[in-house]
């Protein structure tokens, strides 16, 4: 057997067990969340966070912004996020490019994430074109196909400046005709007029495809598309102004978290001095406060900047895949979403 065949066999062995995304509709977490409210430590924090999210859903004036950083989509929460969007439990999304492109769009093309049941040294993984996220594997060759698909979409749209929201909408439009997965967040967002923002969009597989798009266009002497990060900030601020009362459900932190919180300050700078701070806020994170950051400040610290109210906020210091399914299942089964008005904020930009 030649080396290529040996490598193909080894790669198939390592990519043998797919990550199965959790279905929050298949179990009712209300009893365990109610029990956890009577405990202490992170259990009680999660109980209060779940109460706050249910208050967001039951408040007829509250628009909910889902904020995602980290790799929870690859780790099994991809269908969870799709379920929240599909059932009108979120009205807008701010996320990392990796969440939207390397994970959701990647699986929408028919590719998979895999459980790393065996972890050889990472140089071996590199030789097999396997990328690792902690204990999760991605086929690098399939990821490169994703890069090229992003480039193809960029080649097909009008060569002009796009906010990340506008370009992700084009990705969703493309998936309605070419996608392999109905439960894709990008596809569902297009269909339900839920805007998705990625403030650092090119820090993902999209970046490779878009760079190639620009280089090829420049070599051919043709115009090319660009991503306008200022338009991102302006458009998300427009949504905050339009929404009025807002609640944040934040998984991780970093750029997406700070970006969405800054809309309050930006609205004030634009002359909307009556803009409300984010009334509700939940953050699930394992980030530490001792470096002065907590992946873009604690929620109470954000209040000093005039971004978040301290009355209805809760930090949950836990790895998100262990607690987010409980919060989301509890909220799904309590059913406050059934009475919510649909915002369809994507139509603001038509």
Image (spheres, rainbow, N blue to C red):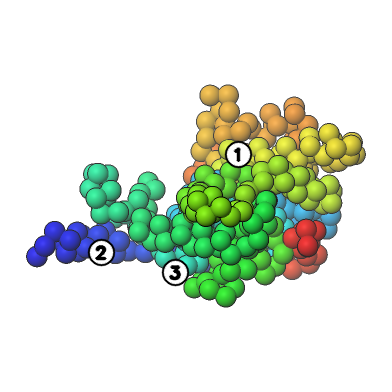
The quarter of the picture where residue 336 lies is bottom right
> How would you rate the neighbour count of disc 1 (Cα within 10 Å): few for under 14, some for 14-19, many for 20 or more?
many
Secondary structure of the residue carrying numbered label 3: loop
Dot 2: what SS?
helix
Left/right placement of residue 110 relative to residue 31 reads left
Residue 62, horizontal then vertical, whole percent:
80, 53
* Residue 275 seen anywhere in this rendered image of the structure: yes
Look at the numbered disc 1 and give the secondary structure of its residue: helix
Q: Which mark is residue 159?
A: none
278 lies above or below 117 = above
* Residue at image location 77% in from the left, 54% down from the top: 63
Q: In front here: 18 or 174?
A: 174
The answer to whether 143 appears left or right of 55 in the picture is: left
Instruction: State the image coordinates of residue 277 (x, y, percent, origin top left).
Output: 80, 39
Pointer 3 residue: 110
Instruction: Identify the residue at horizontal 62%, vertical 49% (top origin).
Output: 226
Q: Mark 3, residues whose alpha carbon is within 10 Å: few (<14), some, or many (≥20)?
A: few
Tell me which label, 2 or 3, sits earlier in the chain: 2
Asked if disc 1 and disc 2 are in contact, CB closer than 8 Å, the reply is no
Query: The N terminus is located in which quarter?
Result: bottom left
Distance Cα–Cα, label 1 vs label 3: 29 Å
Find residue 53 and report its horizontal and vertical position in percent. 69, 52
- Which residue matches tag 2? 12
Residue for badge 1: 255
- In this picture, residue 131 sits left or right of residue 35: left
Measure the alpha-carbon separation of dots 2 and 3. Answer: 17 Å
Of callouts 1 and 2, which one flags the residue occurring earlier in the amino acid sequence? 2
């Amino acid at each position: 057997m030649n080396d290529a065949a040996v490598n193909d066999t080894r790669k198939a062995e390592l990519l043998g067990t797919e990550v199965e995304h959790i279905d929050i509709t298949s179990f009712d977490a209300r009893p365990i969340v109610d029990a956890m409210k009577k405990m202490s430590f992170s259990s009680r924090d999660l109980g209060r966070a779940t109460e706050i999210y249910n208050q967001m859903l039951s408040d007829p004036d509250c628009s909910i912004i889902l904020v995602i950083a980290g790799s929870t989509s690859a780790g099994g929460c991809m269908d969870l996020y799709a379920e929240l969007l599909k059932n009108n439990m979120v009205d807008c999304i701010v996320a990392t490019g990796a969440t939207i492109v390397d994970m959701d769009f990647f699986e929408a093309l028919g590719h998979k994430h895999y459980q790393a049941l065996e972890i050889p040294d990472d140089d071996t993984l590199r030789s097999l074109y396997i990328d690792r996220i902690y204990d999760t594997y991605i086929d690098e060759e399939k990821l490169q196909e994703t890069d090229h698909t992003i480039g193809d979409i960029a080649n097909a749209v009008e060569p002009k400046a796009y906010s990340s929201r506008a370009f992700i909408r084009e990705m969703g439009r493309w998936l309605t005709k070419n996608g392999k997965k109905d439960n894709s967040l990008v596809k569902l967002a297009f269909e339900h007029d839920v805007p998705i923002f990625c403030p650092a969009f090119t820090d993902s597989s999209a970046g490779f495809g878009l760079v190639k798009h620009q280089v090829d266009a420049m070599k051919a002497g043709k115009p090319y598309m660009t991503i306008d990060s200022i338009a991102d900030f302006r458009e998300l601020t427009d949504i905050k102004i339009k929404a009025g009362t807002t609640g944040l459900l934040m998984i991780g932190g970093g750029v997406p978290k700070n970006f969405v919180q800054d809309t309050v300050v930006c609205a004030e700078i634009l002359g909307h001095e009556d803009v409300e701070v984010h009334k509700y806020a939940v953050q699930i994170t394992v980030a530490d406060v001792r470096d002065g950051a907590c992946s873009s400040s604690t929620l109470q610290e954000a209040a000093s900047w005039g971004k978040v109210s301290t009355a209805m906020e809760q930090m949950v210091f836990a790895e998100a895949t262990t607690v987010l399914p409980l919060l989301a299942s509890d909220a799904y089964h309590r059913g406050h979403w059934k009475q919510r008005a649909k915002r369809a904020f994507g139509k603001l930009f038509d």
